[in-house]
Image (tube, rainbow, N blue to C red):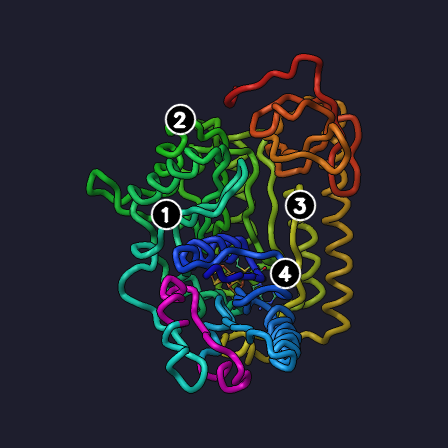
Amino acid sequence: MLKRLHIKTYGCQMNVYDSERIADVLAPHGYVTTASADDADLVVLNTCHIREKAAEKVYSELGRLRQLDRARRARGEKPLQLAVAGCVAQAEGEAMAERAPFLDVVVGPQSYHRLPELLAQRARARGAVVDTAFPVESKFDHLPVASTPSGVSAFLTVQEGCDKFCTFCVVPYTRGAEDSRPVAAVLAEARALVARGVRELTLLGQNVNAYHGHGPDGRTWGLGRLLRALAEIDGVWRLRYTTSHPADMDDDLIRAHGEVPAVMPYLHLPVQSGADPILAAMNRRGTADDYRRVVDRLRQARPDLALSSDFIVGFPGETDADFEATLRLVEDVGYAQAYSFKYSRRPGTPAAIMRKQVAEPIKAERLARLQALLQRQQQAFNAAMVGRTVQVLVERDGRKPGQRLGKSPYLQAVHFDAPETVVGRLVDVHVHAALPHSLAASCGERPSMGAVA
Ligand code: SAH
Ligand code: SF4
Ligand code: F3S
């Protein structure tokens, strides 16, 4: 009998990737995905623990789903099965099963390949089945080949976990130690994705540029070498990777930006703060000038490179002068896009118990100032595209008839009128307006189509 599966995803791109793999794992057991929890037999919440707000959302969603389940039981219908996966599941484990006793399964990011088994166990168990072990064997050895449909662009996890232990961050605890997938496994998954029509790969890792995978030649490969090998695959037109740590940008990787045309000239390189004492207290392993130097080297290798970043304001001990240093760094580097957050105290992390926590109104004021600056930079970056010809990878139809939608090398959404046949191709378009969330463009009479120029 077919069963309906609804997965709700929170947090980072790796969770998006994991949710697709969860669907792949359950598919052979008769589960088909559905867009809404209302008609689902099983709901999986794939959760994020990074900030307090993200984690709280999970409990309010669980409350809502519990109501849905009660209403169904009251009508004599089939009860809803509920599983929590991801980083909140990992961080809370048994405590979550106690706080939400109506749960069926709590499963961490390293064990979701066992979901069918855990659901079967649940049928025999009294309460929720919890699996938050960090198994010695990689889950990747047990995952089926990807089968969920993806468009022209897909994520591919190459590295997971983090050994950096930034003092604010839960990821080293929720995702465990750094681990890289072997080169052969990455290449095999890439080929399988390309065979299904994927043309753009975004390599994922919590610390993706710390990649050190076992190569077919018996040596350890870095990310630069992996990118070169992926670019050799026929049908791989665009390559991206995220998220990188500035301390792991090695020479070969920087060179790859200049030498491999498929590597897109756009890089997410989080810096968090522009003040050296704060960077030290965060355990970021480098100064603001170290970061500036990495950016310079990248731009020497690839002059049209644009950057995005993450920032935290109001880290414990952050003074006005420290915050001004962050604004200065933003002015110096110039970002195409960025995410910024108020520091959120996470239980169990060193920064949570640091003295000199910053008051909420100060955090709010700093965040507003930083976001205004970043917003101006983003608008200027987008406005600078007007009048230029941009190569777009066309992903799908737009909302209006005749309209197609794709992404520029800088991940800007671009819409333009063109025949349906351009979906899945690279086309050159002429940008004529920068709108708040996209670029408006037009396609020439004879669009140039094909692989990377
Ligand atoms: N692995 C990535 C990012 C992981 S989390 C990296 O190393 O950059 C994504 C972003 O969330 C971080 O870059 C940071 O800016 C933010 N973040 C992490 N922990 C946070 C906390 N406790 N409070 C506020 N923001 C946080
Ligand atoms: Fe968290 Fe730092 Fe690791 Fe990024 S590098 S995941 S911010 S500990
Ligand atoms: Fe969140 Fe876990 Fe990703 S905490 S940001 S889902 S690694």
Q: Earlier in the sequence, mark 2 or mark 3?
A: 2
Q: Earlier in the sequence, mark 2 or mark 4?
A: 4
In terms of depth relative to the viewer, which is nearer, 76 or 107? Answer: 76
Q: List the single residue furthest toward the left.
A: 218
Q: Residue at x 44, y 52 (%)?
A: 205
Q: Residue at x 63, y 35 (%)?
A: 396
Label 4 to label 1, Cα distance in Å? 25 Å
Do the CB atoms of the residues marked 3 and 1 lie less than 8 Å apart?
A: no
Label 4 to label 3, Cα distance in Å? 32 Å
* Camera-nearest label, 3 or 1: 1
Q: Residue at x 71, y 35 (%)?
A: 398
Residue under numbered circle 3: 337
Label 2 to label 3, Cα distance in Å? 31 Å
Seen in the image, is 55 located left or right of residue 122? right
The total of numbered circles placed on residues is 4
Residue 357 seen in the current view? no
Q: Position of residue 132 (x, y in %)?
A: 39, 73
Residue under numbered circle 4: 36
Q: Position of residue 441 (x, y in %)?
A: 74, 27
Do the CB atoms of the residues marked 4 and 3 lie less than 8 Å apart?
A: no
Q: Residues within 10 Å of mark 3 (few under 14, many from 20)?
A: many
Label 3 to label 1, Cα distance in Å? 34 Å
Do the CB atoms of the residues marked 2 and 4 lie less than 8 Å apart?
A: no
Tag shown at residue 234 = 2
Q: Secondary structure at mark 1?
A: loop
In terms of depth relative to the viewer, which is nearer, 278 or 229? Answer: 229
Q: Residues within 10 Å of mark 1 (few under 14, many from 20)?
A: some
Tag shown at residue 145 = 1
**What's drawn in magenta, residue-wise?**
94-119
Do the CB atoms of the residues marked 1 and 2 lie less than 8 Å apart?
A: no
Position of residue 394 relative to residue 39, above or below, is above
Question: Amino acid type of disc 1?
Answer: Val
